[in-house]
Image: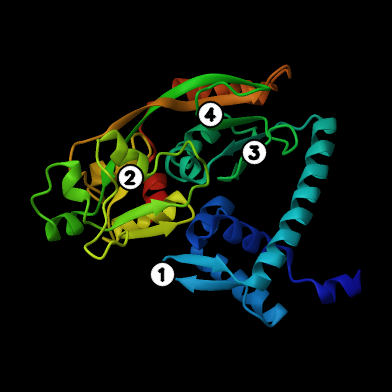
């Protein structure tokens, strides 16, 4: 045991590193682990001092794993998931009340997290575990009791309950709009900087698809180059929009509070209403646990309720 202790950093450093690497953001990692952003930064610094090499490239309001960091993150993630899976199995056998929820990073950060405080207050005995990932989640193999998915609602092996529709529209900061006055139509956006999301999900509406719905080609600048900035998760994209870096695509329900507060504005009124929607899903043929049924019913009853203001402010920072 002493040899392991000398070779390994504190477990708290590994937990902070796993969350920060998965979410590519210290603020989101702090929210997930219920600590401050400064605490996450300290844990990462301690890990790097232990390793004697950096694990992140620091960007403006974003972080990216180094080559060595990616290798370590894969090992840490596998190890922690194995431990968590083993403990979850032991808790199930012991009859402890717990619930594992899956969602995309954007849905978790902007919609789910600001509402979980009320769920915890209503069901204080349920232990929650949230898995936020833009990669497809396998509910059974990942040990997820219930998840939120975007799509048609028809997935093999899953029973789906409709949550709400998808409506997508451009958003930007008030400052950005002030620098580009007179915007009235989708065509007016063609020569602006567009903030795009890496195609983690082919169903997720991107700028190409949005402009196609408007009957327009994707804008290019006079030199023929796309004016684009890409991000690997939605909260970072929205933070870039809040910072005035360009125009992003906003999703109804996700950004309602940021729009009401004036952190974001809609430069034009045009919107695309998708035939797809958001669904609560559970494994088909598997009897949901009491906790999963409680969360399912509670979320449906509160699907259009406003979020907790303080939690939503944290999600948007």
Going from N to C along the chain, the mark reached first, 2 or 4, is: 4
> What residue is shown with label 1?
60
Query: Could you say which is closer to the camera, residue 84 or residue 155?
Result: 155
Which secondary structure lies at badge 3?
loop
Q: CA distance from mark 2 to mark 3?
A: 24 Å
> What residue is shown with label 3?
137
Residue 108 appears in the figure: yes
Q: Nearer the viewer, mark 2 or mark 4?
A: 2
Going from N to C along the chain, the mark reached first, 2 or 1, is: 1
Query: Which residue is pictured at 8% across the width and 50% down the height?
Result: 182
Q: CA distance from mark 3 to mark 1?
A: 29 Å
Query: Which residue is pictured at 53% across the width and 22% down the height?
Result: 153
Residue 122: which numbered mark, if any?
4
> What residue is shown with label 2?
249
Total residue callouts: 4
| Image quadrant where residue 224 sits | bottom left
Position of the N terminus by quadrant: bottom right
| Image quadrant where residue 230 sits | bottom left
Going from N to C along the chain, the mark reached first, 3 or 1, is: 1
Where 261 falls versus 151 (above or below)?
Answer: below
């Amino acid at each position: 045991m002493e040899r392991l202790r000398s070779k390994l950093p504190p477990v708290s450093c590994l937990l902070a590193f796993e969350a920060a690497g998965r979410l590519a953001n210290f603020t989101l990692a702090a929210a997930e682990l219920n600590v401050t952003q400064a605490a996450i930064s300290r844990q990462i610094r301690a890990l790097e001092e232990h390793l004697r090499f950096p694990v992140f490239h620091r960007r403006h309001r974003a972080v990216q794993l180094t080559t060595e960091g990616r290798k370590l993150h894969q090992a840490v993630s596998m190890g922690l998931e194995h431990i968590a899976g083993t403990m979850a199995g032991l808790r199930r056998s012991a009859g402890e009340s717990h619930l594992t929820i899956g969602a995309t990073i954007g849905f978790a950060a902007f919609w789910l997290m600001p509402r979980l405080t009320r769920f915890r207050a209503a069901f204080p005995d349920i232990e929650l575990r949230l898995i936020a990932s833009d990669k497809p989640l396998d509910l059974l193999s990942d040990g997820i009791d219930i998840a939120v998915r975007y799509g048609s609602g028809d997935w093999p092996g899953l029973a789906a309950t409709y949550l709400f529709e998808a409506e997508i529209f451009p958003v930007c900061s008030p400052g950005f709009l002030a620098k580009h006055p007179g915007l009235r139509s989708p065509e007016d956006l063609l020569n602006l900087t567009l903030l795009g999301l890496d195609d983690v999900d082919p169903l997720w509406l991107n700028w190409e698809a949005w402009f196609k719905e408007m009957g327009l080609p994707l804008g290019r600048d006079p030199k023929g180059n796309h004016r684009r900035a890409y991000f690997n998760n939605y909260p970072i994209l929205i933070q870039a929009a809040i910072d005035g870096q360009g125009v992003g695509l906003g999703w109804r329900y996700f950004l309602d509070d940021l729009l009401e507060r004036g952190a974001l504005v809609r430069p034009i009124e045009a919107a695309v209403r998708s035939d797809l929607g958001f669904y609560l899903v559970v494994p088909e043929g598997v009897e949901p646990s009491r906790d999963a049924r409680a969360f399912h019913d509670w979320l449906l009853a509160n699907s259009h309720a406003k979020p907790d203001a303080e939690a939503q402010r944290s999600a948007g920072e």
